Amino acid sequence: MTDSVQENSQLLAAFRNAMRHVAATVYAVTTSNYGQRYGILATAVNSLSFDPPSLLACINRDASVHDPLVAQGKFCVNVLAQANRDVAEHFMIPTAPDRFSVGSWVDVEGVPVLESAQSSFVCKLAAIHEFGTHSIAIGELLEARHRMDAAPLTYFDRGYIDITGAPEHGER
């Protein structure tokens, strides 16, 4: 092994360790194509612009949802609530015959939306950019839903944490 490969390996290990300690909201990114539903869990999702209202989701190109999302041209970012932990755990099972058998899912604009999610953002695919192992899917908002009575499911250091006890900053 060359020094540059060892350094890259060490850099990757340090990056993974550091990112493991960044708390992140858990999202279920979903789509459907030819009547088949697809979904993955993601933490790399962000708002992008208010005009037009849009967000981005980073999706591994090897993920089962990637190609159907590109083909369909629409997707939903479901912000999982703490009460949706069962959905998250079911989505994590690689051999699960139907990821959508847990939770109450409805079709909105042709994509699966989790009714009990904290928030859901149905988007049309506006652009897609490849970088490294992932594609950055930019979605322009078609519909948004939000529940005030649900706290987000948050992932930190390989486990879920409850952030509802965190002090509030500013007014709601």
Image: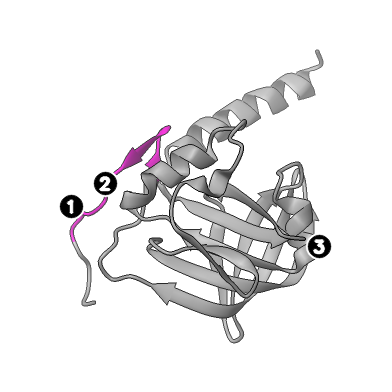
Q: Which mark is residue 71?
A: 3
Q: Which mark is residue 165?
A: 1
Q: How many marks?
A: 3
* Residue drawn at the location 39% of the way across and 42% of the way down: 86
Q: Describe the element under mark 3 as helix, strand or loop.
A: helix
In 3D space, how far apart are the residues under numbered discs 2 and 3 (Cα atoms)? 36 Å
Up the image or down, 93 lies above or below 3; here it is: below
Q: Which mark is residue 55?
A: none
x%, y% of residue 129? 78, 61
* Residue drawn at the location 52% of the way across and 70% of the way down: 121
In 3D space, how far apart are the residues under numbered discs 1 and 3 (Cα atoms)? 41 Å
Left or right: residue 118 versus residue 14 is left
Is residue 71 found inside the magenta-colored segment of the image?
no
**Residue under pointer 2:** 162
Q: Give the image quarter of residue 73.
A: bottom right
Asked if the residues shown at circle 1 and circle 3 are in contact, with their CB atoms under 8 angstroms apart, the answer is no
* Residue drawn at the location 50% of the way across and 54% of the way down: 27
Mark 2: amino acid: Asp
x%, y% of residue 78? 49, 61
Left or right: residue 98 versus residue 118 is right
* Residue drawn at the location 58% of the way across and 56% of the way down: 29
Residue 42 in sight? no
Residue furthest bottom in the image: 51
Residue 50 in sight? yes
Up the image or down, 156 lies above or below 46; here it is: above
What span is colored magenta in the figure? 155-167
Q: Residues within 10 Å of mark 1 (few under 14, many from 20)?
A: few
Q: Give the image quarter of residue 132.
A: top right
